[in-house]
Image (cartoon, rainbow, N blue to C red):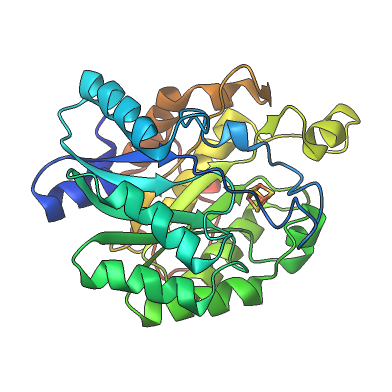
Amino acid sequence: MILSARINTYGQDLLRRHGERVHKIALDAGFTCPNRDGTKGRGGCSFCNNISFSPDADTRLGLAAQIAKARRAIARRTRARKFIAYFQAYTNTYAKVEALEALYLEALKEPDMVGLAVGTRPDCVSSEVLDLLDRYRDQGLEVWLELGLQSSFDKTLERVNRGHTFAEYRTTALAARQRGIAVCTHLIVGLPGETEEHCHATLDAVLETGVDGLKLHPLHIVKHTLLAHQWRKGEYAPLSREGYIAMAANLIERTPENIVYHRVTATASRDVLLAPAWCAEKWSLLNGIEIKLRKRGARQGTRAGTPFVNEELNHVA
Ligand code: SF4
């Protein structure tokens, strides 16, 4: 399977631009989230159990120790010698800018760190934070602002208790890109009440706003979430594996080639995952997406700029 033959993957993009493999190190800097502590809301997004998003990071360790541990683990698997500090867990801009600067610098002072990726909510990015990220970019570092949008439909955002709107996402994405900061937007496929048409409308809205990277994520049900409760009561049914693969392939085909896919699926560890079971099998899913595109003779951008039509009706794949 050569996914990068069909998709503009972040790994290949880094390889092209840095001339060698660069690996992301997921970090937990001990942030919280305004959608949990009452500032924006309580209880968080209905699907959120942050352990499922960043299982490798260990908040009991300081940042330097987390980086050292990840570096050792990566060395066993790849030959990457350069890294990007990925502030992943919870809302990584949720602090005063001085505190953020101290944390980001702690990671960036590592000699093999070539950049920074900051995952956050669209309504939690002040102009001071953007200025700070812009300064790192000016220094030649690789800088990504990763914005969790999930859907462009405010009705859906409300339904899953996101606590922000699409307009807030748009304002932040525009402000970041105006400064030249690369934006990677996270989208979830299979949200309650949404069909495939909603996912394509969200993709169109994100493309129209302007974006540099995307992450696709099938909605999975993990322990200790409101979604788990809704699923148990029969109020939510997850996507099938084949359904996700077809939908991901359709979204990828409609994405212009220049946009970098940082991820086309996501997995959860078996100890927190309730359903669907296929969400624990990352490589099988990636294979499935690659095979789907290959059988169609398609790749990222094949149908960019065209309206969405359900390809499963047109292809025998
Ligand atoms: S998904 Fe992100 S914004 Fe939502 S509750 Fe979890 S950490 Fe907060």
Q: Residue at x 30, y 29 (%)?
A: 68
Q: Nearer the viewer, residue 213 or 75?
A: 75
Q: Position of residue 60 (x, y in %)?
A: 52, 29
Q: Nearer the viewer, residue 315 or 267?
A: 267
Q: Residue at x 86, y 32 (%)?
A: 229
Q: Nearer the viewer, residue 96 or 307?
A: 96
Q: Residue at x 59, y 17 (%)?
A: 270
Say which quadrant the C terminus sits in.
top left
Q: Is residue 74 above or below residue 165?
A: above
Q: Position of residue 182 (x, y in %)?
A: 35, 67
Q: Is residue 190 above or below residue 198?
A: above
Quadrant in the rendering for residue 230: top right
Say which quadrant the N terminus sits in.
top left
Q: Position of residue 33 (x, y in %)?
A: 66, 52
Q: Is residue 194 above or below residue 276?
A: below
How many circles with numbers are drawn on the protein?
0
Residue at the extreme right of the image, as rendered: 233
Quadrant in the rendering for residue 243: top right
Q: Residue at x 20, y 68 (%)?
A: 139
Quadrant in the rendering for residue 132: bottom left
Residue 6 is at least partly visible in this image: no
Q: Is residue 73 above or below residue 225?
A: above
Q: Is residue 89 left or right of residue 7?
A: right
Residue 222 is at least partly visible in this image: yes
